[in-house]
Amino acid sequence: MSFLGKGSKAYSIFALKCPKCHEEDLFETGSLSFKNSFEMRQECPNCKQNFFPEPGFYYGAMFISYIFMGWFCIGFVLFFHWVLDWSTAASFGLLILFCAVFFVYIFRLARSIWLNINYRYDPAKAKKA
């Protein structure tokens, strides 16, 4: 099993797949689609894993997103300002543009990480190919 291969946590997280079977997508639309961007499936069509096990389940994903984005933003601006010698305004401008374009993916990534913290891959639930 490789780091980004099926059966690994990284595959499920970054591909936004069901954490139990790694077969179906967590979201019906693509990450760069702004139609129903925040609508998530209720359950996996393949293994019937419930993606909303209790009210407020994704509250923890908010903390993951906040911590990740905080450190990412600091590193992003420092890299462009100190390493590439851009102005502070240009560094922040590029950061705002980046965050505006990838906001939906970051939101989805935080939810995927939270699901993968709480559920394990079960090869028996995966489709037999």
Image: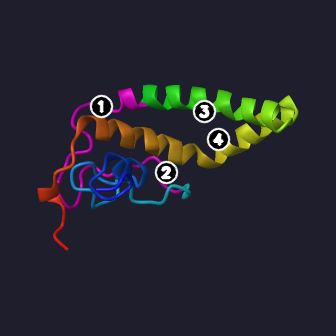
Which mark's residue is nearer the viewer, 3 or 1? 3
Q: Are marks 2 and 3 in contact (CB under 8 Å)?
A: no
Left/right of residue 108 with respect to residue 80 in the rendered view: left
Labels 4, 1: front one: 4
Q: Nearer the viewer, residue 128 or 99?
A: 128
Sequence-first disc among 4 and 1:
1
- Which amino acid type corresponds to the residue marked 3 in the rendered image? Phe
Q: Give the secondary structure at mark 4.
A: helix
Residue located beneath label 2 in the image: 37
Residue at 34% across / 58% down in the picture? Answer: 5
Give the magenta-colored segment's residue range: 35-61
Any mark on residue 72, and which?
3
Q: Is residue 60 magenta?
A: yes
Task: Verify CB contact (< 8 Å) between mark 3 and mark 4.
Answer: no
Left or right of 62 on screen, residue 82: right
Q: CA distance from mark 1 to mark 2?
A: 19 Å
Residue 49 vs 115, above or below: the answer is: below
The residue shown at (68%, 44%) is 98
Where in the figure is residue 126, as x and y percent of width and height? 18, 61
Q: Secondary structure at mark 3?
A: helix
Amino acid identity at mark 4: Cys
Q: Residue at x 32, y 46 (%)?
A: 9
Q: Which residue is mark 4?
A: 99
**Residue carrying label 1:** 57
- How busy is the neighbourhood of tag 2: few (under 14 within 10 Å), some, or many (20 plus)? some
Helix, strand or loop at label 2? It is: loop
Q: Counting residues from the N terminus, which is met first, the one under dot 3 or under dot 4?
A: 3
Residue 14 x, y percent position in the rendering? 43, 50
Look at the magenta stretch and give its main secondary structure. Answer: loop
Separation of marks 4 and 2 at Cα, in angstroms: 15 Å
Q: Earlier in the sequence, mark 1 or mark 2?
A: 2
